[in-house]
Amino acid sequence: MIVSMTGFGRAEGVFNNKKYSVELRSLNNRYLEIQIKSPKYLIAKDFEIKDIIREKISRGKIYVIISLDNEIEQEFLSLLTPDALKSYLQVLKNIRKNIGSSEKIKIDHILKLAESVSSEMIPGVDDTEFSFIKSLLHESLGDLLIMKQNEGKFLEKDILKRIDLIESAYSGFEEFAKVKIQKERDKIKTLVNEIVSDQNNINENRIELEIALLAEKLDITEECTRLQSHIKYFRNFISSDEFSGRRLNFILQEMNREVNTVASKSNDAVISQTSAVIKEELEKIREQVQNIE
């Protein structure tokens, strides 16, 4: 089954007059990496949130954004009145005096103190509220998976089209190689006959041995068979139920290896040119596979 690693999902809802939204963004990554941005009172729930995502996604860089409507922001701003700011400044001055510090008090210090006070005023999340947040997470995750699967269908269509092109391009390799081997055999015999005028001095067994060795070097039957086998496995895994991105990438490497061997053994311009076309298609498929989970 082809599932893209890129996608987006979102869900939102209201719990006790609190408007929550959950966004999931997925990008390409070699392994599964999850980054969470959420209100401070949810930090303790990060592991549970990651476990929920791991159940559905195996690869990709996942950004999780859990946000609350601007009620908290308004509450924080309410702590930044002129009188409150003066109080924070006086607190910081007292701290500096008590510890004997000469460091200048900056606006950043005041804001961090205000943020610390505001976080203390915000209560933690109870099980009922977190269950609601998890329901939004599941909803946004479902939205994300649908997008990943839809994009995967487009990838699969494009990849299979290129596999068909590769299969068609190499289909005549074996027959072409057999014809070439026979031509080389005839060429060697003709050359020997031209060089040696006395037929009695020709060692037919030696000539046949040299021709056999040459034929073995030119024979690409084994490589063509393996290439066909790789294509078969590629088609099987692309339609299987497992997440097959890594496996497909490995098979592509093996296919590329066989094509390189064919090009080097054949010693023929036509096969070399066709091999170059196949390698170009394999590279395009490899780029697509990098986006598969």
Image: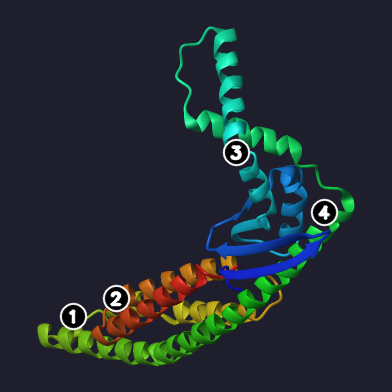
Q: Is residue 2 visible?
A: no
The scheme the figure's colours follow is: rainbow
Q: Nearer the viewer, mark 4 or mark 2?
A: 4
Task: Indicate which disc residue 109 carries.
Answer: none
Q: Residue 102, position in %: x, y?
A: 46, 11
Using the numbered discs, state the Cα–Cα distance from disc 1 to disc 4 in whole angstroms: 95 Å
| 222 left or right of 133 in image | left
Would you name the residue on which mark 2 appears? 210
| 231 left or right of 192 in image | right
Disc tally is: 4
The quarter of the displayed image where residue 150 is located: bottom right
Using the numbered discs, state the Cα–Cα distance from disc 1 to disc 2 in whole angstroms: 16 Å
Using the numbered discs, state the Cα–Cα distance from disc 4 to disc 2 in whole angstroms: 79 Å
Q: Which of 202 and 254 is in front in this view?
A: 254
**Crowd band around label 3 with a 10 angstrom C-alpha radius: few (<14), some (14–19), many (20+):** few
| Quadrant assignment for the N terminus | bottom right
Would you name the residue on which mark 3 appears? 81
Q: Type of residue at label 3? A: Thr
Residue at image coords 33%, 92%: 179
Residue at image coords 11%, 83%: 195
